[in-house]
Amino acid sequence: MSDIIHLLPDSIANQIAAGEVIQRPASVVKELVENSIDAGATHIQINIKDAGKTLVQVIDDGKGMSETDARMSFERHATSKITQADDLFALHTMGFRGEALASIAAVAHVELRTRLKGAEVGTRLEIAGSQLQSIEADSCAEGSNFAVKNLFYNVPARRKFLKSNETEFRNILYEFERIALVNPSVAISLYHNETEILNLPETGLRQRIANVYGKKVSQQLLSVEAKSSLVSVTGYIGRADATKKRGALQYFFVNGRFMKHPYFHKAVMQAYDQLIPPGELPNYFIYFNVDPATIDVNIHPTKTEIKFENEQAIWQILLAATRETLAKSSAIPMLDFEAPDTIDIPVYNPNAHPWNGEIPKIHIDTNYNPFRTEPAKENLSRPAFDWEELYKNFETDRTSVLPEEGVIEKRSEPAADFEEILSHTQPEKEDKLFTDNSPAVAASSCFQYKNRYLVTTLKSGMAIIDQHRAHIRVLFDKYQKTISQQKGATQQMLFPAMMELTPAEEAILPELMEELSYSGFELSNLGGGSYSINGIPAQMEGVDCVDLLKDILNKAIDTGCKAHTDITDMIAFELASAQAIPAGKPLSPEEMDHLLASLFTCPNINLTPDGKKILTLLTDEELESRFR
């Protein structure tokens, strides 16, 4: 029997490695920009075409490479970061394994132009599919210029599974934001299809956050700081009154590297316990600085999962630091001295504008007495007020005041039978409100329990209905039909609302713009991530349209809605949830009857669009069993 085990060619081995390191265009951006930072770059420019499928170009002013280093950088496990195994536990650089450039070159056409600081000429190198095409001298600028073209050109199966341009570019934005947030001292810019997306100058950390996510986010942050022999924790957390249900900005960084750490996330959330409503999420940007020997970053190909030696102790320090910051916080606004827009307060100069007028004086009527039945002689113009007349019919009028709606008064005599109470309002004929697959109504009347549930009788028993969820179902079906039929009514706003979007939110907006327009929204792009809301769906008064639109955008980002039906359902659900009757609101009998009538005409009366139960039925048999 012949031998069957053999070594893989380098080209195939590199493609296999590329499957772990280079998953999409965003991976290329991450690896190249991190290499630029390791090279000491102070200015980095990223050019993207077709969401990185056609071109990912990274230009930096770092230290550059010699001709030999340029050629060696594309070999597997070729690195300048480590020389022995112990170096893995003393890392101060972003990359170290020497796999990134080899993996990129295995699945794309790569052109590198680089020149060392102070060198007269540089090097131009072309490589494709791990095969060197050409290498020659070049009169390029100092630093490095990587151009990665036609990603996955030789692996069609991988290219086929790339997402749409919008989705892939959104992932590039995520990587860009993570790198920008941890390197505020580096000026970095991003262009997509020759359009400037972000241009971030060198600045401080708080201002970098403001430049990426807007001043509003920066103004809602509280500074966190804690230092010990194990770890130094710095950064910012969001105020307790600035949380959101989705789309929260939550970032952990350790030694200048982005990481995901669910265990530390629990520490932050525990600090907010009892301070924010359930389901709400705060923003946080938290930076850990630890001894590199106490962490292991080499446990995941993308190096986003990091193992800590003193994890439990750091958890306690993080929890204490977050709690201390929240305890010290108050509603007093903070001055942002890094903000470019400041207000100059003039210095008082009494000689600049002398005051020649009379100083206002306060006149006090010392003879005024509000309890005097006869007006004082000095104040004959003030009419007399008879307090006895005001209270004369007070006791008798109390009997005509009806009890508050939804409240059943306590009686000294035995209460009447439940059926007897409802019999006074039962219609003579059966109300046709239900569909064929729903229970028939025995009485259209109902009453409200604790301003949250509606209780009514059916032929088969008693139904208890959650008024908030019932209204969500009614409004969802209404908006779903409106958007599908493109018949949304718009209510023009007297004063348009201004909305600031993050790059990721702005990137997904075009995908939703058509459905938003059909639902009744009118938006205008003002540039720079700013939009004006000129119109909103009719009957949406009292709803914060900015927060509503941001919720819609962030849910689309989280769920990745692509199909027209998915987008329609998502927008309809968000609109319905924002407008639905809240739990705790008293309803008049007419409002209760109208809500039930609308609910029972819906195709599905049992569940909300997100699968929550709307009503529960207590049958006659179950009710009788409780009195046995």
Image (cartoon, grey):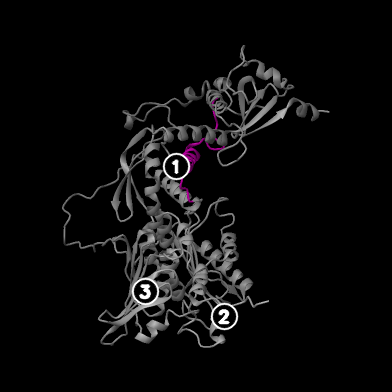
Determine the CA span between mark 3 and mark 1.
42 Å
Please tell me which residue is depicted at 59% across the width and 41% down the height of the picture. 611
Q: Sequence order check: which comes first, mark 2 or mark 3?
A: 3
Instruction: Indicate which label's residue lies in the foreground, 3 or 1.
Output: 1
Please tell me which residue is depicted at 50% across the width and 56% down the height of the picture. 240
Expressed as whole percent of the image width and height from the top left, the position of residue 9 reads 51, 76
Against 374, residue 192 (above or below) is below
Given residues 488 and 355, the one toward you in this image is: 488
Q: The N terminus lies in which quarter of the figure?
A: bottom right
Amino acid type, label 3 = Ser
Q: Which residue is mark 2?
A: 229
Expressed as whole percent of the image width and height from the top left, the position of residue 139 reads 25, 81
Which secondary structure lies at badge 2? loop
Q: Counting other residues with Cα less than 10 Å from the Cα at mark 2, is it few (<14), some (14-19), or many (20 or more)? A: few
Against 401, residue 23 (above or below) is below
Q: Counting other residues with Cα less than 10 Å from the Cα at mark 1, is it few (<14), some (14-19), or many (20 or more)? A: some
Q: Sequence order check: which comes first, mark 2 or mark 1?
A: 2
Q: Sequence order check: which comes first, mark 3 or mark 1?
A: 3
Q: The C terminus lies in which quarter of the figure?
A: top right
Please state the extent of the stretch shown in magenta in the rendering.
560-588
Quarter of the image holding residue 71? bottom left
Amino acid type, label 2 = Ser
Q: Which residue is mark 3?
A: 185
Instruction: Indicate which label's residue lies in the foreground, 2 or 3.
Output: 3
Q: Which residue is mark 1?
A: 564
Against 519, residue 151 (above or below) is below
Expressed as whole percent of the image width and height from the top left, the position of residue 612 reads 60, 40
Task: Check residue 565 for magenta coloring.
Answer: yes
Which secondary structure lies at badge 3? loop
